[in-house]
Amino acid sequence: QVHLVESGGGLVQTGGSLRLSCAASGRGFSVYGMAWFRQTPGKERREFVAEITWWGGSTYYADSVKGRFTISRDKAKNTMYLQMNNLKPEDTAIYYCSAGNVVFDESTLATATPPSYGMDYWGKGIPVTVSS
């Protein structure tokens, strides 16, 4: 069984930065990619933020975060990161780490459905609050 644990969330002012981490543990951890999603209270769907392929390091971002957020991973530590810069109040959400074998692009995101959105593993989520 694979476990994902997020850390690094918190409260920051508009324009500030935070770095989220997602540590993966468990025997035989081997996935195509890891991704960040976020969800705001009252919204049924989680919003895709970014994905990184585990072995190749290719990345894909939602338009809303492109140029401000950077996803990365450290294979030796089985850890994924999300560097968030120039944060805006609309970035306020619970951020979830996920892992699985889905290639996210415009097409797959259009058909991805809750609760799993095709991913095999999920963390419990961590809050990020951006004050105006």
Image (cartoon, rainbow, N blue to C red):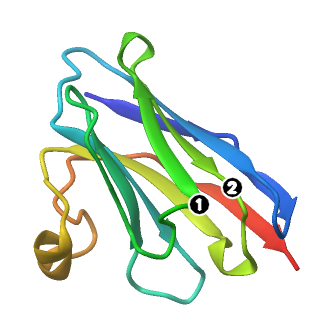
Is 130 placed left or right of 4 in the picture?
A: right
- In the depicted structure, whether residue 11 falls above or below residue 33: below
Image quarter where the C terminus lies is bottom right
Count of marks overlaid on the render: 2
Q: Viewer-proximal residue, 65 or 21?
A: 65
Question: Disc 1 designates what residue?
Answer: 68
What residue is drawn where x is 21% and y is 53%? 119
Q: Which mark is on residue 51?
A: none
Q: Secondary structure at mark 2?
A: loop
Q: Viewer-proximal residue, 116 or 48?
A: 48
Residue farthest toward the bottom in the current orientation of the protein: 42
Contact (CB < 8 A) between labels 2 and 1? yes
Q: Secondary structure at mark 1?
A: loop
Q: Amino acid at mark 1?
A: Arg
The span from disc 2 to disc 1 (Cα, nearest Å) is: 5 Å
Determine which quarter of the picture holds residue 8.
Answer: top right
Residue 76: x %, y % from top left: 39, 10
Q: Which mark is on residue 85?
A: 2
- In the depicted structure, whether residue 54 falls above or below residue 8: above
